Every structure is written in structure tokens, then in C-alpha cells.
Amino acid sequence: MKKLESSLLNMVLVLTGVAIVVGGILAAVNHLTEGPINAQKEKALADGIKAVMVCNDIVVANTDEVKQNDDKGKELTFTVYQIQDKKGKDLGAAVESSTMGFGGNLRVLVGFNPEGKILGYTLLEQQETPGLGAKADNWFQKGGKGDIIGKDPKEPLTVSKDGGQVDAITASTITSRAFLLAINNAYKAYKTTPAPDAETGATDVRTKK
């Protein structure tokens, strides 16, 4: 009996030791890879901002987190990257916005000029159906069937099926509605974010015109 108890104790001690060693190895690997992964994410975001602002020579003057409630009272969080050129001139902002699409979370980065017109967009995350909703990556780009570039969402953008002015992705109306909602919400967040004044350092809230 004592021999059996001793064997069980040894097994527990060995397994505990293995778990500690494996945990230490995983922690070390995570620490080593965390830096490169974060650097890669930062580069992807920087490249995305340049793409949606359609300009390479830019500076992120400020980053704001904006919270707003949607029509159903749900609190939404937006990240607004205020963009200037290297002389301090306001170029507008790139805004991260997300909604629920047909397949899951749909996260968009959209660029606005100082007047609120859409400069460009890119999808940061999407789980839509390949060949259908996933077409949102290109469908609404300049020259696409649902082109939104240059539009001012002062009047919310909606699909033509709902009486709006934007052609929905074929067989993917739900994704199209979700995408445009993300754009419209991003616009509202942008318009309520103070714009830095390059000359005085003061801020003016971007109001709807």
C-alpha cells in the first residue's frame, strides 16, 4: 500500500514539474513573440491609415477613443486617428468602426477629409461568406459597383433596396447594410471629435454642415 502511495506521489510530482517547465517555456515563447507581433500590428495599422487617407506623408497628431450609443442604445467604441501633414495642416481622420455582419464582427477603417467626405476604407476584420459578403473589401471601393468614395455620409448611406443610393453586394444585402452602418457610425464619431488647430493649439468640434 505504501509503495502504491509512493508511486502516486511521484507521478503527481513529475506531472507538476512537467507542467511548470512547459508553462515556463510557453511564457518565454510568448514574451519573445509578443514584440514582433505587436510591431506587425502597428505596421499594418500605419499602412492602413495611409491607404484610407490616400496619402503617405502624414502624421497621426492625436488618437481619441469615442463612445456613442447606437439607435438601440448599445454603447459603441470608436478609435479616431486625427491626421495632419508634416506642417500641421488638418487632413481629416481615420476612424475604426465595427458592426455585426452576416458571419460575425465586421471591422472597418475609414478615412475622412476635413469636410467629412470619404477618402478610402479598408477592412480590418471580417468573417463574411467567401465569394459573397467578403466582396465588401472591394465592392465599395472607387470604381466598384457600390462605390462610396467621395460621398458625404451627412445623410446616412443606405443600400438601394432600402431606398438609398448605394448598390448592395449581390446576394449579400445583410453584409452591405452592416458595412454602411459601420461607415455611418464612423462618420458620426469623426464629426464629434475635436480637430487640433495647428496654429493656436486649440480645438474645434467638427460640426455637421
Image (tube, helix red, strand yellow):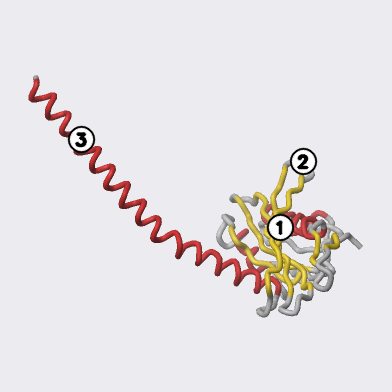
Residue 62 is drawn in which quadrant?
bottom right
Amino acid type, mark 3: Leu
Residue at the extreme front: 200
Judged from the image, the secondary structure of the residue bearing numbered disc 2 is loop
Q: Which residue is mark 2?
A: 72
Q: Which mark is residue 64?
A: 1
Structural distance between the alpha carbons of marks 2 and 1: 24 Å
Amino acid type, mark 2: Lys
Q: Which mark is residue 151?
A: none
Q: Is residue 177 above or below residue 7?
A: below
Marks 1 and 2: in contact by CB < 8 Å? no
Q: Earlier in the sequence, mark 2 or mark 1?
A: 1
Within-10-Å neighbours for mark 1: few <14, some 14–19, many 20+: some
Structural distance between the alpha carbons of marks 2 and 3: 55 Å
Residue 131 is drawn in which quadrant?
bottom right
Q: Which residue is mark 3?
A: 13
Amino acid type, mark 1: Asp
Judged from the image, the secondary structure of the residue bearing numbered disc 1 is strand
- Taking the spot 60% from the left edge, 61% from the top edge, the residue there is 124
Front position among marks 2 and 3: 3
Q: Earlier in the sequence, mark 3 or mark 1?
A: 3
Q: Is residue 55 above or below residue 114?
A: below
Q: Quadrant of the C terminus?
A: bottom right
Structural distance between the alpha carbons of marks 3 and 1: 51 Å
Judged from the image, the secondary structure of the residue bearing numbered disc 3 is helix
- Taking the spot 59% from the left edge, 57% from the top edge, the residue there is 126
> Residue 176 vs residue 160: left or right?
left
Q: In terms of depth relative to the viewer, which is nearer, 121 or 175?
A: 121
- Taking the spot 70% from the left edge, 76% from the top edge, the residue there is 54
Instruction: Estimate the x, y position of residue 161 in percent, counting from the top left.
Output: 79, 56
Q: Is residue 85 above or below residue 4?
A: below
